[in-house]
Every structure is written in C-alpha cells, then in structure tokens.
Amino acid sequence: MKEKHHRLHQLDFAVSLGVIIGLAVFLINILSQMNLFGGFPVMVLIFKDLYGTIGYSQTALGAILVGLYAFVDTFILALLFAWIYNKLLSRTSKI
C-alpha cells in the first residue's frame, strides 16, 4: 500500500509560521525589557546581532520592529521551504 503525502499550501504555511515566530520574538523582547524569567540575555544578543543594523533597540518600538522583522524572515524561509517540499514531493510521486 502506497503512502499518500499531502502538499503544503505555501502561503498558508508561510503566514502561520511567520505569525507564530513573530509573536514569540515580540513576547521574548517584551519579557526581556521587563526583566522577567531572567531577561533572556542570550536572545537579546541574538536579536542585536541579527537586527541591530536595521534599527533594533531594546525599546517598545524595537520590540515591534524585531517582531515584524522576524515575521518577514520566517515568512520568506517558510515559503521557500514549502516550495522545495512540494517540488520534491511531486518529483517522488512520479517515481
């Protein structure tokens, strides 16, 4: 019996993953500003390394910006992942 694999809907996958990661990064930044749960110092350093040159700072506006940047980055990567997955899936289904 042959397994049936389902294709990913690229846009839905990319938007949903982008929203989840964007909100998570936003919340981590807000919690680090409030110094809750240890302040997430490693994550703040990662955010500064990734987004420091394009306006990230540890402020309320910085939290919004880093959340939006994370959404855009994740959206693009998830869209690319879903496209590659669907291409590989269609290639293997022909075999």
Image (cartoon, rainbow, N blue to C red):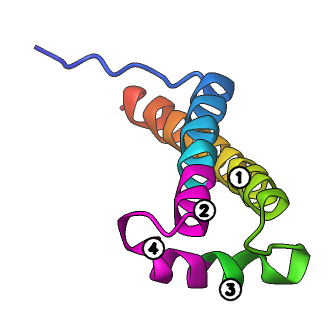
Q: Residues at badges 2 and 1 in contact (C-beta under 8 Å)?
A: yes
Q: Residues at badges 3 and 2 in contact (C-beta under 8 Å)?
A: no
The residue indicated by pointer 4 is: 40
Q: Residue furthest left?
A: 1
Up-down: is 1 above or below 57? above
Q: Nearer the viewer, residue 83 or 76?
A: 76
Residue at disc 3, secondary structure: helix
Q: CA distance from mark 4 to mark 1?
A: 15 Å
Residue 83 is left or right of residue 62, and the answer is left
Q: Nearer the viewer, residue 78 or 27?
A: 27
Residue type (three-letter) at the residue carrying disc 1 = Gly
Residue type (three-letter) at the residue carrying disc 2 = Asn
Residue at x 56% of width, y 63% of height: 34
Up-down: is 37 above or below 44? above
Residue 89 is left or right of residue 75, and the answer is left
Q: CA distance from mark 2 to mark 4?
A: 8 Å
Residue at disc 1, secondary structure: helix
Q: Earlier in the sequence, mark 3 or mark 2?
A: 2
The residue indicated by pointer 1 is: 67
Residue at x 38% of width, y 73% of height: 38
Q: Earlier in the sequence, mark 4 or mark 3?
A: 4
State the image coordinates of residue 1 (x, y, percent, origin top left).
Answer: 10, 13
**Within 10 angstroms of label 2, few (less than 14), some, or many (20 or more) residues?**
many
